[in-house]
């Protein structure tokens, strides 16, 4: 399996893609040795920054986590202000960029965090939530992998909006 830089992604290479598939998509791809000790150390530094803003941290991977900042312990005023300060501190402390999704639930926050990568913030309010989800391809939804995405596509389910339209052609239990 491989991680993918934004340059490699332009050729269709994706994170967690098998190396053989990645090299087929991008024959000039450069593989670098992993340095998990370094990744873990940087991840720990970033998590320490998170801990300055909340005790409610749910890690997803070395470089992703959900933060519940409902309680504004630093008095910054908004979740967006907290996210901006965290992103600034990550850049100052590690030299890395960070993307952030700010919303009222984890599902939408995760979608929002992918919206303005590699170095952006996306804020989805309650008022915008439904329209935002409806506008996105279901393949972007957290938990919809390639197999389920292809199955949904065959059934005509391409966007979040398509999930709202009952379709008698979609058999009950199609996704069990």
Image (cartoon, helix red, strand yellow):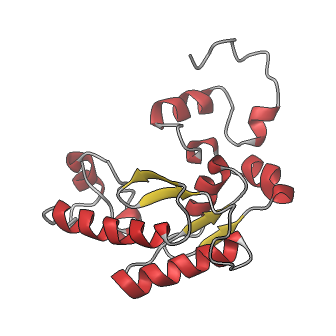
Residue 63, above or below 157 = below
Relative image position of residue 28 (x, y in whole percent):
21, 67
Residue 109, above or below 18 = below
Which residue reaches farthest top?
172
Kindly indicate the quadrant of the structure image that contains residue 43: bottom left
Whether residue 35 is visible to the viewer of this picture, yes or no, is: no
Residue 142, above or below 147 = below
Instruction: Name the residue: 70% across, 18% down.
Output: 170
Instruction: Name the residue: 64% across, 13% down.
Output: 173
Using the image as rendered, state which of residue 98 and residue 72 is in the foreground.
72
Residue 115, above or below 140 = below
Is residue 148 found left or right of 77 in the rendered image? left
Which residue reaches farthest left?
33
Relative image position of residue 80 (x, y in whole percent):
68, 73
Is residue 37 found left or right of 102 in the rendered image? left
Relative image position of residue 93 (x, y in whole percent):
37, 84
Identify the image quadrant of the C terminus: top right
Mark count = 0
Which residue reaches farthest right?
127
Instruction: Name the residue: 59% across, 70% down.
Output: 116
Kindly indicate the quadrant of the structure image that contains residue 165: top right
Instruction: Name the residue: 82% across, 56% down.
Output: 126
Using the image as rendered, state which of residue 26 and residue 144 is in the foreground.
144
Whether residue 171 is visible to the viewer of this picture, yes or no, is: yes
Using the image as rendered, state which of residue 113 and residue 168 is in the foreground.
113
Using the image as rendered, state which of residue 67 and residue 60 is in the foreground.
67
Is residue 151 found left or right of 11 in the rendered image? right
């Amino acid at each position: 399996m491989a991680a993918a830089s934004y340059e490699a992604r332009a050729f269709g290479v994706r994170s967690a893609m098998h190396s053989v598939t990645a090299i087929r998509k991008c024959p000039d791809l450069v593989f670098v040795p992993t340095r998990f000790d370094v990744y873990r150390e940087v991840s720990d530094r970033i998590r320490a920054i998170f801990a300055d803003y909340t005790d409610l941290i749910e890690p997803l991977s070395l470089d992703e986590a959900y933060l519940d900042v409902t309680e504004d312990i630093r008095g910054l005023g908004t979740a967006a202000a907290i996210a901006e300060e965290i992103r600034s501190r990550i850049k100052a402390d590690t030299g890395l960029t960070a993307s952030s999704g700010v919303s009222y639930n984890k599902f939408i926050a995760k979608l929002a965090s992918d919206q303005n990568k590699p170095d952006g913030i996306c804020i989805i309010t309650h008022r915008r939530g439904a329209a935002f989800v409806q506008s996105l391809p279901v393949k972007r939804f957290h938990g919809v992998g390639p197999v389920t995405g292809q199955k949904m596509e065959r059934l005509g389910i391409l966007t979040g909006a398509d999930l709202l339209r009952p379709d008698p052609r979609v058999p009950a239990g199609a996704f069990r």
